[in-house]
Amino acid sequence: MFNVFLYVTGALIVLSLVLLLGFAVYLTNVRRKFAHIPSPPMASFFKGHADEITAMRHTGFPTDQKFLEWHIEYGKILVVWFWHVPVLLVADSEMVKDIYIVKNLPKEEVSYEVLARLFGQRFLGTGLVTNVDNESWKKRRVILNPAFHRKSLKDLMDSFNSTANILLEHLGTMADGKTEVCMCDQFARAALDVICKVAFGMDIDIINARDTKFTEAVSLTFHGVEEASFDLFHKYKVNQYPFQRRVVKAIQFLRETGRKVIEVRKNAMKKGEEVPDDILQHIIKLQDQNPDFGMEDVLDDFVTFFIAGHETTATLLSFCVLELGDHPEILESLVGEVFDVLGDKQNVAFDDLAKLHQLGLVIKETLRRHPPATGLLRKITKDQEIGGYKMPADVAILTSTYVSSHFPEYWTNPEEFDPYRFDDEELVKRSHYNYFPFSLGPRNCIGQHFAQIEAKVLLSRFLQTFKFSLVPGQSRKILERTTLRPKDGVICTLTKRQ
C-alpha cells in the first residue's frame, strides 16, 4: 500500500513538472513574438507584470500610476504581461488618434466580460458600455442619442435644480461648523437622485438616506467588479463565495428594480397616459424597434445608465471639493464668479452655464488630475503596424487618460492643480488626444454633457450656499473600485454663507 502511495505521489510530481515545463516553453514562444517591443523588467517569469500591477491597489495610487512610471522610463508604447496574456500600453497622442478615430478599433471582449456578467450573474450584459459588436452598438446609440441632445438637456435644468435644493436643505441640517460631513456620500446620493428622476421617473428619497438599498447595491457591484478584475482565480476561492453572493443579490436587486420600473411605464403607455420623453422612454424604444430584444436586453441599458449615470458626477464633484479645499485662492476666485453670475438666485438657468467659465476650468482640470474612469481597451483585429511595430492579431491595446493627462511631455507641472492652464487655446488644441476623460471617437461617453451640466449646477449652488473646510488628517489616497474616488471620502465641516 505504501509503495502505491509513493508511486502515485511520484507520478503527480512528474506530471506537475511536465506541465510546468510545458507552460514555460509555451510562455517563451509567445513572448518571443513581442521581443521587439519595449517592456519593463518582469518580476516573475510565470506571472509577468501581474503582481506589480495588482500591488498598486494597496498604495493609494491608481493602477495607472504604475503604467505612467513605465511609460516615462521605457517609452510611449510598451508590452506588459498578465501571465501569458500580452497587453500593449500606448501613450502616444498620434497612436491614440489612430486607434480611436482613424481605425476605430473594436472593444476587447475579454476585458468587458466582468462587467457584462459578474460572478455568473448578468450585470451590464450587452448594454451601451459593454456591447463589443459595433453594428449592434450603433443601433442602440442612434436610438438613445436624442435623450442627450442640447434641447433635452436644457429641459432637465428644473430637475437638476430641484435635486440641488434638496441636497442643500439636507446639508444645511449639518452646517454648524463642527459636524463632519462625508461629501463623497452626499454627492453620490444627489447624483443618484438625479439619474433616478430624470432618466427613469423614479422619485426616491435617496438624499435624506431613508432608503440606502440603491447606494449600497451600486457600491457593492463596483467592489465586485474590482475584485473579479484583479483576481483571475476568484472563481475557485471558496472563502470569497459569501461576498460574491452578496454582489449577485445586489445585481439582482438592481435588475429587478429596472424590470418593475419598465413594466409600470409600459402599462402607463398602454392606458394612453402622458409619459416623459426621458432615457427610459428611449430604452423602451430600443425594444419596440428591435423585435429580437427581450426584457433582459432592455435591462442591460437600464442598469448601465443607472450605474454609470451617477458615478462620474459623484466622483468628479468629490475631487473638485478636495482640490478646492487644498487651493483656497482658486476657491475664493471661483466663489466670486458664482456670485457674479447667480447672485442670490435659487436656481441655475441654462444660459448661466456658459458664464460660469472658471467653474468649467475647474471641472476640466479635476477630470485631468482625477479621471473617474482611467483606461480604455481596444483590440487589434488583424496583423498590422502600430507605432512602427508589427503587431499580431487579437492583441489588446490599453490607453489611459490618466497616463496621457499626467505625461510630462504633454503637460507643464502635471501634478499641480492649475485650472487656468485650460485658458491656453494652444494647449487645448494640442491636448485633444492626450486628454480624454470621456473616451474618444464614435464610442465616446454618451452622457458626458449631462454629467458636466449636472456637476456645474450642483457645485455652483453648493459654493453659493456654504463655506467648507477639509477636516485635517485626511490623506489624498485614491480608492480604485472600477472608478477612482477619494479614499477618505472628502470629510468637511460646513457653515452657511451670510
Image (tube, rainbow, N blue to C red):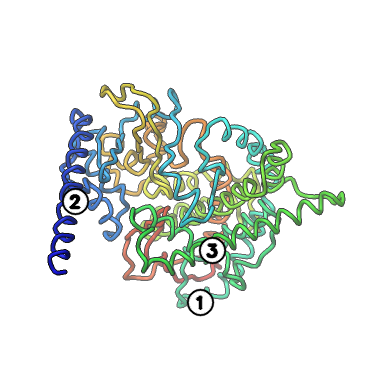
Check disc 3 and report the residue beneath it.
250
Name the residue at 33% across, 38% down.
404
Residue 140 badge: none
Q: Residue furthest front?
A: 1
Please, what is the three-letter code of the amino acid marked with disc 3? Ala
Q: Is residue 104 above or below residue 258?
A: above
Quarter of the view holding residue 320: bottom left
Disc 1 is placed on an element classified as loop
Name the kind of residue labelled 1 in the image. Asp
The residue nearer to you, when weighing 224 against 22, is: 22
Answer left or right for 389 relative to 220: left
Residue beneath disc 1: 176
Residue at horizontal 35 percent and vertical 35 percent from the top: 397
- Read off the residue under disc 2: 15
Extreme residue toward the right, this view: 272
Q: Do the residues labelled 1 and 3 touch (CB within 8 Å)?
A: no
Distance between the alpha carbons at the discs numbered 1 and 3:
36 Å
